[in-house]
Image (tube, rainbow, N blue to C red):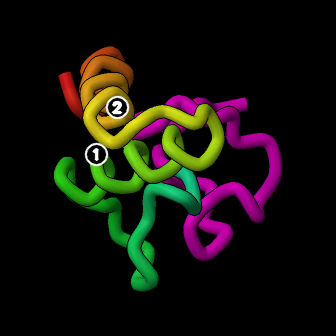
Amino acid sequence: MKLCISCGMPMTKPADYPMQDESKDYCVYCARPDGSMQSYPEKVKGTTEFLIQTQGLDTQAAHDAAIRILAKLPAWR
């Protein structure tokens, strides 16, 4: 099992990979429609929105948390 280098999600099945390409080191949620990895600003925005929706954080708190979370992941060190 691989962990996504961009968000940390466990990737356990082909559907977890962009275009089901298991050679990728990032997950389907961190990929653009063409299968390439999102940029850091795209990932911060997406993670911020995810935290607002799932954790009920306000925008600034979610943004700050997203930056702290992403800083710990290999793609963004």
The secondary element bearing badge 1 is classed as helix
**Which residue lies at the image location 62% right of the left edge and 59% below the top edge?**
17
Say which amino acid is labelled 1.
Answer: Val
Residue displayed at 68% across by 33% down: 10
| Corner quadrant of residue 61 | top left
Q: State whether residue 52 is above or below residue 2.
A: below
Q: Is residue 24 left or right of residue 68?
A: right
* Residue receiving disc 2: 66
Marks 1/2: CA–CA distance: 6 Å
Q: Is residue 70 above or below residue 31?
A: above
Residue 18 x, y percent position in the rendering? 56, 67
Tell me residue 27's x, y (percent).
55, 52
Q: From this viewpoint, is residue 39 visible?
A: yes
Q: Residues within 10 Å of mark 2 (few under 14, many from 20)?
A: many
In reply to whether residue 14 is colored magenta, the answer given is yes
For this orientation, the residue located farthest to the bottom is 34
Whichever of labels 1 and 2 marks the residue nearer the N terminus, that label is 1
Query: Is residue 73 visible in the rendered structure shown here?
Result: no
Q: Which residue is mark 1?
A: 44
Which type of secondary structure does the marked residue at label 2 adopt? helix
For the image, the number of numbered tags is 2
Q: Left or right of 54: which side holds 69?
A: left
Query: Residue 48 sits in which quadrant?
Result: top left
The magenta segment is 1-26
